[in-house]
Image (tube, rainbow, N blue to C red):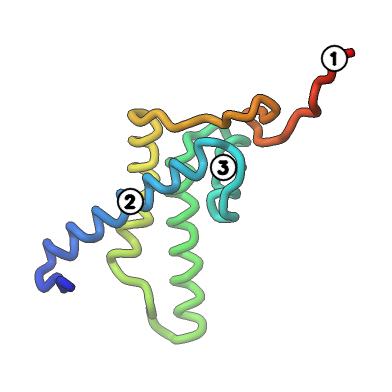
Amino acid sequence: MVLPTSWWLHGIGLLLGTTLLAFGICMEVAPKLIMVPGEGIVRAFSMVTKVRFGTVKVCFDISLIVIASVLSFIFFGRLNGLGIGTIIAAAITGVIVNFFNRHVRFVAPTDPRIKTTGTTVPSQTTD
């Protein structure tokens, strides 16, 4: 196991991890079938506001950091458990998601009964 000892190795690890996370989010959200609650609420806000998913994700993640900071000061009297890597990851994950959404084509649902909203359409029967 390699342990990074310098700040630039930590930075490379952070960028690689954030890029992998953003790619996974794109693969999860693209088919519009099912997603974890955190991405689901971002998708709902994105659909209602007509703002790009990645942009809403940055706002959502930063709001979670603000909430965590406030709660940290309330319960511990100081900033606890929130590092620079968390802040950087929150700020750039959505940007990378937007990049992937613009430049990478993900697989759409293959079931013809599934509309792009993720709901199923009743089967059509012919007599």
- Mark 2 = which residue? 20
Most extreme residue toward the right is: 127
Which of 44/31 is in front? 31
Q: Which mark is residue 126?
A: 1
Crowd around label 2: few <14 · some 14–19 · many ≥20 (10 Å): some
Q: Please state which amino acid type lies under the numbered disc 2.
A: Leu
Q: Are marks 2 and 1 in contact (CB under 8 Å)?
A: no
Report the amino acid beneath label 3: Arg
Q: Residue at x 41, y 48 (%)?
A: 24
Quarter of the figure with residue 87 = bottom left
Of circles 1 and 3, the one toward us is 1
Label 3: which residue? 43
Residue 65 falls left or right of residue 6: right
Measured in 3D between alpha carbons, the distance from the residue under mark 2 to the one under mark 1, in whole angstroms, is 46 Å
Badge 3 density bin: few <14, some 14–19, many ≥20, Cα 10 Å: many
The disc labelled 1 sits on which kind of residue?
Thr
**Sequence-wise, which precedes: disc 2 or disc 3?**
2
